[in-house]
Amino acid sequence: MEDKRNPNGELSLTQVVELVGLPARLELVREGLDLPADLYRKLVRRVADHYFGVVGLGLRETRPEHYALDLRGGSEWRDVAYALAHVANVKQDRVVYHDEEELLHRGPEGEPRDFHDFKDAVWANLDLLRADPSEREVQQRAFRAAAEASLEVIKARRAA
């Protein structure tokens, strides 16, 4: 994931959508959910912020369709690395990382790496958070439900 972030340390909207497993806006439009672009971005940010919160990260919009990852409430990059290693172990249903220190020295397939700090190791291993197919299905259903509810609120406001 490290090579996919821009030099400012941001993720694009497309990268966030893919990582979290959300439906693309055009997919929703094809299904009849004509979500305005700004509402789509807000929903993506909200859902993704909760998704990243599992490992102690928050998502902050830096400019339209670009997001920075911030530490959440008192977390440190070492804490995030620990949580990320735990997520990797759970997803693989085996011990991939014994502790967060291993994120600094090797990748999930055992390949050697050399990161000098936990922040770089977390960025390089963000793919460990990538939603698997069953998570994607749940995420997409929940997102569609949120989009439908948002459109209903907009419709009700216009009618009032």
Image: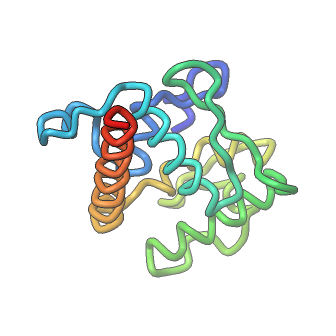
Residue at screen point 49% across, 51% down: 47
Quadrant of residue 82 in the image? bottom right
Q: Is residue 159 left or right of residue 31?
A: right
Position of the C terminus by quadrant = top left
Residue 66 location in percent, x, y?
54, 25
Residue 121 location in percent, x, y?
68, 46
Residue nearer the viewer, 21 or 85 = 21
Residue nearer the viewer, 41 or 151 = 151
Most distant residue in the bottom direction:
94
Residue at screen point 37% across, 52% down: 146
Residue 148 location in percent, x, y?
29, 49
Residue nearer the viewer, 33 or 135 = 33
Quadrant of residue 15 in the image? top left
Quick check: 66 above or below 95? above
Residue 69 location in percent, x, y?
66, 39
Residue nearer the viewer, 87 or 137 = 137
Residue at screen point 48% across, 60% down: 109
Q: Is residue 79 left or right of residue 127?
A: right
Q: Is residue 13 left or right of residue 61?
A: left
Quick check: 58 above or below 1? below
Q: Is residue 113 left or right of residue 152?
A: right
